[in-house]
Image (cartoon, grey):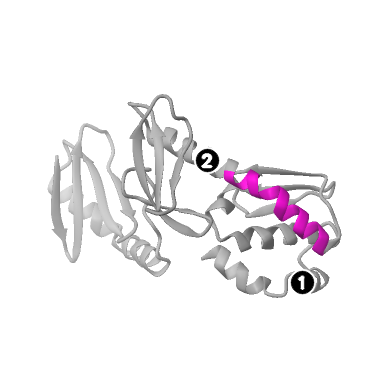
Amino acid sequence: MKEKILIEDLTITLYRKNIKNMYLRVVPPNGEIKVSAPLFVSDNDIIDFIKSRKEWILQKQKYILDNEIKAPLKYTNGETHYLWGEKYTLQLIKNDTVKHVLVDKEKSILYLPVPKRSTIEKRKNILDEFYRQKLKNEIPQVLDKCTRIVGRSPKSINVRKMKNWGNCKQDGRITLNLNLAKKDPICLEYVMIHELCHLIEFNHGKNFKKLMDKYCPNWKKIKKILNA
C-alpha cells in the first residue's frame, strides 16, 4: 500500500509492506522522502521515527538540491543519455537479432535493443558496451595526435568503468573510463594528454602542471567541462 502523509512540514511517501524493519530514503532529484514500514507498525511509531531523523532528512535534501543530484538511471524510454557531449533520448526496441545500439543523429535518439524480459542491469550493460566500443574506436587517432604533442607513448591502453577519468601506471599502462564516450571529444584529448604527461612526471605537482600548461594550454577549462 502507498500513501502520502504529512509529518510536521515533511511530506512522506509511505509504503506499507510485509517486511520486518522500517526503511527511510531521501531520493533525487527533488529530495522526495520515502518510508517503507512493516504492516504491523503503528502510525505513531512512524511519526516518531521521522521526527527522530528530521535533521538528517533536511541535510540530505539540501545536499541533493545544492548539488543537483540526479535520480539513478533506469534505462527506460524517454531518458536522456549522452554521446560525445550531445543529448540523446533513449528508445527501447525489443529485438532478438540486433545486438548493438543504433544512433539516429537527426532525431537525437539512441535505440537500445533489449530482450523481451530485460532488467535494468541488462540494459545498462548493453549501453555500457556501446560506450566502450565507441571510445575504443576513437582512441587510435586521439592517441596518435596526443603522443605527437607530448612526445611519449604508453605501453598499452585499456578501457573500463572506473571512478577516475583515467589513470597511468608507472610501467606505462594507461586506463581510460568508458564514460568518456559521453563527453565532448575534447575531454578525451585532455585526459589522454594528462595521462601521457604522467609518463614524464608521475604526480600532480608544479612540474606536472607546467607540462599540462605546455601541452594543453586550456586544460583547466576542459577539466570543468569534463566534470560538469
Rendering coords of residue 123 (x, y %): 42, 36
Secondary element under disc 2, as helix, strand or loop, is helix
* Residue holding disc 1: 209
Q: Quadrant of the N terminus?
A: top left
Q: Quadrant of residue 120?
A: top left
Seen at 30% across and 61% down, the residue is 30
The picture places residue 72, in percent across and down from the top left corner, at 39, 49
Q: Is residue 2 magenta?
A: no
Q: Is residue 127 above or below residue 193?
A: above
Give the number of marks. 2
Task: From the viewer's perspective, tell me whether residue 43 is left or right of residue 218.
Answer: left
Please state which amino acid type lies under the numbered disc 2.
Phe
Which residue appears at 37% of the width and 32% of the height?
Answer: 119
Of residue 142 and residue 23, the one placed in the foreground of this image is 142
Residue topped by disc 2: 130
> Residue at the spot x=86%, y=60% of the render?
151
Task: State the extent of the magenta-drawn residues as a range.
Answer: 134-149
Q: Secondary structure at mark 1?
A: helix
